[in-house]
Amino acid sequence: MNMVLTAVLAVFLVGCGSASASVPVAQRGQGQPYEIVGSEVWDVPDPVSGRGYQVFVNLPASYAKDPARRYPVLYVTDADYAFPVLRQVGRRLGSSVQEFILVGVSYAVGEEGTTSRRRDYTPTALGAADAPDGAVHGGGAAHAAYLRDQVLPFVAQRFRTDETRRLFLGHSYGALLGTQILFSDPALFSGYVLGSPSYWYDDHVMDRMERESAQTLRDMPATVYFYIGEYEAKKVGNPRYLQDDDMVEDARRMERTLRARKYPSLKLRLDVLNDEDHLTVAPRGFTLGLKHLLPGPSKTDP
């Protein structure tokens, strides 16, 4: 897989080389794009919308050596950023997390990321006030159906996934999509990492969707990990905090509401991460989310 890593990613990965037990592979020189060694790219178009999408796949180090083993599989949105970060986070955590198959779902081929994610990750057509004229929102249900009907079967047929441990990770609008799936089809994934969810969207439409789902749902058979940055709270006049929305309180309210439903199989945790904002919190949230959903063996285990 060829990708130009962002400056944020380059800074984040400094010093991570020692975390991998694999033999380093030389990159192609003479100005060629940086290659994420061991990754794969597959075209998985959406026959309903006619749009092209790709999935990026990274297999665990033991995959080829243990042909009978099946692995948990983690699906991530905003894959241009999240896929390479999560790959390196997983490698750095080593045995403190279980090995997993990582699958990143791309933006629509040929579209800008902001255009694709506005449409595909949001639940209703009423977008943010600062969205440009003509921006399309509200394709979350259609994109969830694409994941269910195209991406998940594609991956399950080609790789040794443990389909009882199918996980989802999304940040911001990606967490909106994950929440929409949690309310409409919670068993589609056994675990969810919902990072800095944009629950302010469309006048807190997710609160209304939650109430509607509670009328018919009898259980949410999933483990849900919320993370959000300390500075995503609202403190007017303090530039380190938000000035219009209180995303921390929104996430806490959602956690309280879901706990109050007393779904028998639902497990919840929310962490407010100190000294983090909406732009800085993701790598730390990814790390904690992996450790929460895929904990490795304890030091006391043989």
Image: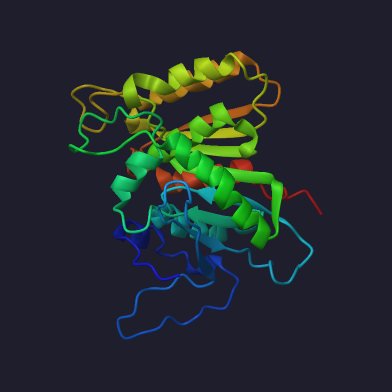
**Quadrant of residue 59 in the image?**
bottom right
**Quadrant of residue 215 in the image?**
top right
* Camera-side residue of 247 and 110: 110
Residue, x 40% and y 41% (percent of image)? Answer: 120
Residue, x 41% and y 49% (percent of image)? Answer: 78
* Camera-side residue of 16 and 263: 263
Residue, x 34% and y 47% (percent of image)? Answer: 116
Estimate the x, y position of residue 108 in percent, counting from the top left. Answer: 38, 53
Estimate the x, y position of residue 203 in percent, counting from the top left. Answer: 33, 20
Is 212 rendered above or below residue 39? above
Estimate the x, y position of residue 159 in percent, counting from the top left. Answer: 66, 61
Q: Is residue 97 visible?
A: no
Tell me the quarter of the image containing the N terminus: bottom left
Residue, x 32% and y 51% (percent of image)? Answer: 113
**Quadrant of residue 128 in the image?**
top left
Report the number of numbered marks.
0
Tell me the quarter of the image containing the C terminus: bottom right
Is 91 rendered above or below residue 243? below
Is 85 rendered above or below residue 146? below
Estimate the x, y position of residue 249 in percent, counting from the top left. Answer: 40, 21
Is 214 rendered above or below residue 112? above
Instruction: Report the residue that reaches farthest toward the bottom.
Output: 30
Side of 62 where 3 appears, left or right? left
Instruction: Report the residue that reaches farthest toward the right.
Output: 302
* Camera-side residue of 204 and 154: 154
Q: Is residue 194 visible?
A: yes
